[in-house]
Image (cartoon, rainbow, N blue to C red):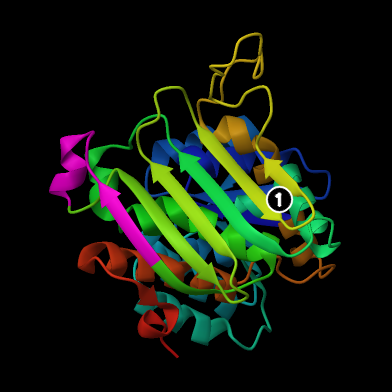
Amino acid sequence: MRIGILGLGRIGAFHAETLSALDVVTSLVVADPLADAAKAAAERFGAEIADSPEALLASGVDGLVVAAATDAHPALIRAGVQAGVPVFCEKPVARTMAEAVAVRDTVRDGAVPVQIGFNRRFDAGFAAAREAVRAGELGPLHTVRCTTLDPAPPPAAYIAASGGIFRDCSVHDFDVIRWVTGREVTEVYAVGGNRGAGYIGEAGDADTTGALLTLDDGTLAVVSNSRHNGRGYDVRMELHGFIDALAVGLDDKLPLRSAEAGVSFPAGPPHDFFMDRFAAAYRAELAAFTEVVAGGRPSPCTVEDALEAGWIAEACTLSRREHRPVPLTEVRQA
């Protein structure tokens, strides 16, 4: 199949590398506002260059990968769908939930599939945890803990346009909590602080946050996030049930060290970058998209899924601002 890629920054270039290595992908067509980025991808992966999204879609692509700036996501998703081309788009669907709802309404009939990039659904550990929960191995859950700690914050320009830590970072935890447990969040209470880079607080954001989520069966989920984690990139999940408990992310590259005498775990170098921790998941995610393009499976992460995680982020943003619990019904739009 022939795949188009719009946006060739860090993640777009990685997607080009991944797709070029798949046997089912016979050719790539790329476009980027920066001509040098498109030229570099063309030279490295033997891709064709299109001078605009319209030209790319007119070139006969079978699927479209959107890795452009967030502001461009809604228009590019719509363009792909209107051209009848299945779309993979990195999260978020749009900068605001109102825009995301409008995109959902555009694609709601499902005639052209859209897959949103929540890569943790394709990580082997999270997938195994989901299967364990579905099989009843843990018994009914009572507590879930999720952690995403970045080793260092992104630049000030990124922070200013990110929509805030809950929408940009925590949303991955919110999505995987829904996906693994199969439950919905009914209420949140969130707090945040600023003890690191000054420009984060100046942008009205927090660099470290905690959120308590109540799920629809009474399970409590605790989500911890930070832009500053000196030892590395730390992503984990714990699931505690009445029969057993299970953890995701306890490998030898876990960025923690033990204070207990005689304990050598974890023994390896810590994860220090999200591409290091989730490289295999990103590849599996795009392999799944080629199956969507071929008509072999439905979208494994729909626009509707992305909106559900987005509502949780909206509720946490409001909760932190107003220092109170927020039910999801308060922020959700029809």
SS at circle 1: helix
Question: Whole-percent x and y of residue 247?
Answer: 69, 42
- Specify the quadrant that holds the N terminus: bottom right
**On screen, residue 266 above or below 18:** above
Residue occupying the point 54% across, 59% down:
221
Of residues 133 and 41, the one nearer the viewer is: 133
Is residue 273 visible to the viewer in this orientation of the structure? Answer: yes
Is residue 19 visible to the viewer in this orientation of the structure? Answer: no
Question: Whole-percent x and y of residue 58?
Answer: 58, 67
Question: Is 133 left or right of 13, judged from the image as shown?
Answer: right
Q: Amino acid at mark 1?
A: Phe
Magenta highlight range: 189-203
* Total residue callouts: 1
The quarter of the picture where residue 138 lies is bottom right
Q: Residue furthest top?
A: 262
Q: Residues within 10 Å of mark 1 (few under 14, many from 20)?
A: many
**On screen, residue 298 above or below 275:** below
Q: Residue furthest left?
A: 202
Question: Whole-percent x and y of residue 300?
Answer: 71, 65
Of residues 75 and 311, the one nearer the viewer is: 311
The quarter of the picture where residue 117 lies is bottom right
Question: Is 300 left or right of 191, judged from the image as shown?
Answer: right
Reading the image, the residue beneath label 1 is 122
Residue occupying the point 40% across, 65% down:
313
Q: Is residue 192 magenta?
A: yes
- Specify the quadrant that holds the C terminus: bottom left
Of residues 90 and 189, the one nearer the viewer is: 189
Residue occupying the point 52% across, 34% down:
234
Q: Is residue 295 magenta?
A: no
Question: Whole-percent x and y of residue 136?
Answer: 84, 62
Residue occupying the point 59% across, 30% down:
276
